[in-house]
Amino acid sequence: MNQRPKPRAPGSVRIIAGSLRGSKLPVPDRPGLRPTSDRVRETLFNWLQPRLPGARVLDLFAGTGALGFEAASRGAAGVLLVERDPELARSLREQAVRLKVERLQVVAEDAIAWLGRKPEAVFDLVFLDPPFAAGLWEPAAAALAPWLAPGALIYVESPRNVVPSLPASWPVLRAGETRDVRYALHRAGD
């Protein structure tokens, strides 16, 4: 019986638009590491473009950093990437230096543990795209409230067949799906 090989992560993802347009970010072969596709990122950032300039952005499960770097490229005032894998966090820092992105900070910590701290700042936009197998949408969403600015936007990505249970105070503004993923942009209640 022939088994199909598991698809491997691409070697890099490119930043689609903005000051870093065309720059590539490395994608190591790691279990659960699944960068948001170019098509989905383009749709998402078209939705976000009016709100990005000057926004404070949190990328909770940063992975490759594609969402956070794209936000920085398109005018976010500050981007905080939280990534628990020390090697990925180190790579994110190296990419920030290589691309000269000074308004991007990396925290090497478990996202759920990090959310348990007292907030030092609030965010206008949060990317909530955890490793799918970990099922961390609900615990992260439950811990996010003190970190959200009034009317903050929350982007949530999940497998196509999974609808995370999110706070009722987060109405869906826009949503879409591909063959593999469901993605939605929510707004936090004021």
Image: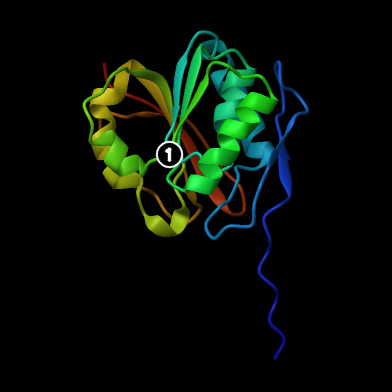
Q: At 61% from the left edge and 48% from the top edge, which residue is drawn? A: 178
Give how far across and how far down residue 188 sits, in percent.
32, 24
As drawn, the residue found furthest toward the bottom would be 1
Instruction: Answer with left or right where residue 34 lies relative to residue 172.
Output: right
Give how far across and how far down residue 20 sits, in percent.
71, 21
Is 10 placed above or below 169 here? Answer: below
Q: Callout 1 environment at 10 Å: few (<14), some (14 to 19), or many (20+)?
A: some
Q: Amino acid at mark 1?
A: Ala
Is 133 placed above or below 142 here? Answer: below
Instruction: Answer with left or right where residue 40 lies relative to residue 187.
Output: right
Q: At 51% from the left edge and 53% from the top edge, which residue is drawn? A: 160
Query: Toward the viewer: 114 or 16?
Result: 114
> The residue tagged with tag 1: helix, strand or loop?
loop
Q: At 47% from the left edge and 13% from the top edge, which residue is drawn? A: 55
Instruction: Say which quadrant the C terminus sits in.
Output: top left
Give the image quarter of residue 125. top left
As drawn, the residue found furthest toward the top would be 54
Residue highlighted by disc 1 = 108
Give how far across and how far down residue 71 sits, in percent.
57, 22
Give the image quarter of residue 162. bottom left
Query: Toward the viewer: 55 or 20?
Result: 20
Instruction: Answer with left or right where residue 103 lies relative to residue 5.
Output: left
Q: At 23% from the left edge and 36% from the top edge, which residue is drawn? A: 116
Give the image quarter of residue 72. top right
Give how far across and how far down residue 113 sits, in percent.
28, 42
Q: Does residue 65 appear in this view?
A: no
